[in-house]
Image (spheres, grey):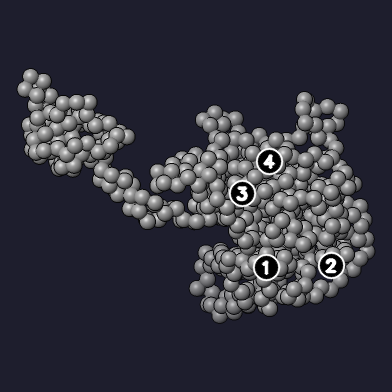
Amino acid sequence: MTPRGGEPRSSLPPADRAPEGRATEAATTRARTDEAATTKAAPPEARTADQPAAEARATEELTAEEQAAERRAAEERAVEEALALVGRRQPHESHAHSAPELLGTTASRRPEPFGSSPSGTNSCRTDSHPGGNSFRADSHPGDPGPGSGQTSPAQPGWQNEPGRQTEPGRRTEQGSRVEPGSPAEPTSPVEPGSTLPAASVTSWHGARALARRLGRAAPLAAHRLPLERALGHVLAEAVVALTDLPSFDTSAMDGWAVAGPGPWAVRTGEGLLAGRGEGEPLLDGQAVRIATGARIPAEATAVIRSEHARFDEVKGLLHATRAVVPGQDIRPRGQECRSGDQLLPAGTVVTPPVLGLAAAAGYDALVAVPLPRVDVLVLGDELLTAGLPQGGRIRDALGPMLGPWLRSLGAEVSAPQRLGDDAEALRRALTASDADLVLTTGGTAAGPVDHVHPVLAEIGAELLVDGVSVRPGHPMLLARLADGGPYVVGLPGNPLAAVAGLMTLAEPLLRGIAGRPAQDSYHPPVREEVRGHPLDTRLIPVVHRADSVMPLHYSGPAMLRGIAAADGLAVVPPGGVRSGAEVEILDLPWTSAEPWTEGCFT
């Protein structure tokens, strides 16, 4: 197995901003002081009825800009620190902040009802395992956080994704541990080359950016594949024309090849057919029958389509019923390309038309990047592989879904391994894998049989993302096995939550490993208001309708009915979006929306 080391293809700009909490607080204080001074200095008659509203809007805009800047800085620090963790690069000195600021965490920005302390920050007491990796981060005791099933006072009626009760000292769904009565412990900056603690939850954009950068940092191999096996791969070398296309002058139509002005004396015989050698040259005033694709005889000046000519069999003369232009309906040699022209650059995904072009240009094989190899580990004793749910057990929805989904992303996927709730079986499967990525389903939370975190800690894995600020799917994780081993993406067990983890972490990681370009971002308007989570990003199934997108119903974490009819996922920011507002869209690898879906799902 080849270790995936090496330098990343590009580096992020250094973050020269102050840490989140201090910068935001200072900027907000300055803004409020300036506003107060301005208000006192203004005469009473200058204060119109609209002034308070205008000042409020200006303050909101300033705060939004500062928050956006801080989010960008946090995401940049996330990528820098995580790349340093896996040996890709050294973090910039200005990024060596305390652990709660790493990995784009959002804990310091959470309001008190959802935070675990008045300040909203988490202490980062790490539990080290023999591999030296700081694997866990402890939270302050306090009020339940997101994922506890508590209704948000900030948004009446909002129900969080169902969580589990957390016993003292047990891991929460976000991956942190709650110790009864443990005080906040100070954190220290992460030094270059040291192990990065997994602190709090990672922002959705930060987690996705990190997965994309880790994938792109993997060195690209190359191998030569016959055309019949190259579909879906990415070109490691450019396709350069090996010959002129077409390689000789050919007829574009069935008809008559003629020389000079008409009428033309018709040469007898079967005419010129495709695949035959060059015929005898034509003399001025002569014509000969020709088929599409046949080689043009020397001295021919045009091709007349059969429907545009009249043959006088008695006199043996051919007459044109329309004006004849020299060169008409002749495909000249090199019309499409000349030998040596670049037809396709490296990095192009091999599609059926790419195969056709390569064959036409003279290729029998292509040099391409190997497909990323993925192992899928399905966890859970409660899963059935056939029949109806019964006896408290349910059908496995992820096993049949993940393989085709991953293949549509350009991966080579092994048959799912069904391990149940067996920690030892999970350990053996992880340590035996020689894939590029291991995908696990379920077991990432804090239940009595949720073994993913303990097993990863036992085998010395590096935990890169431990929970993402997104609904559904917040208990997802990203890790790297020791000694340059595979990446591990832990998906939640709920089906739509697993889809969120797949699109957040696995999809950008696999694109990078395969050499595929990142998915283009675009922002169409949404037809209806979409309620957001007060703190987290939401991923909502949508379907395109004309120039906008329509959110679909049945978008709960355990549901697949909405995503089955969707052709994309809307990235809904905290607080939601109003009708007509633009929203970021993640395209799915296919289009499943049909005319009947709107009435059933919207």
> Which structural element holds mark 3?
loop
* Residue that badge 3 annotates: 371
Q: Residues within 10 Å of mark 4 (few under 14, many from 20)?
A: some
* Residue that badge 2 annotates: 132
Q: Earlier in the sequence, mark 2 or mark 4?
A: 2
Q: Find residue 356 and report its image quarter.
A: top left
**Contact? badges 2 and 4 (CB < 8 Å):** no
Real-space CA distance between mark 1 and mark 2, rounded to the nearest whole angstrom: 18 Å
Q: Position of residue 232 (x, y in %)?
A: 55, 45
Question: Which residue is rendered at x = 84% and y = 35% of the image?
Answer: 382
> Which structural element holds mark 1?
loop
Q: Find residue 268 and report its image quarter.
A: top left
Q: Position of residue 2 (x, y in %)?
A: 69, 58
* Residue that badge 4 annotates: 402
Real-space CA distance between mark 4 and mark 3, rounded to the nearest whole angstrom: 16 Å
Real-space CA distance between mark 1 and mark 3, rounded to the nearest whole angstrom: 22 Å
Q: Nearer the viewer, residue 98 or 306?
A: 306
**Contact? badges 2 and 3 (CB < 8 Å):** no
Q: Residues within 10 Å of mark 3 (few under 14, many from 20)?
A: many
Q: Nearer the viewer, residue 528 or 92?
A: 92
**Contact? badges 4 and 1 (CB < 8 Å):** no
Q: Find residue 290 and report its image quarter.
A: top left
Amino acid type at circle 1 is: Arg
Question: Which residue is rendered at x = 65% and y = 66% of the image?
Answer: 6
Residue 323 in view, yes or no: no
Left or right? Give the position of 76 relative to 272.
right
Which label number is shown at residue 88? 1
Real-space CA distance between mark 2 and mark 3, rounded to the nearest whole angstrom: 32 Å
Q: Earlier in the sequence, mark 4 or mark 3?
A: 3
Real-space CA distance between mark 2 and mark 4, rounded to the nearest whole angstrom: 33 Å
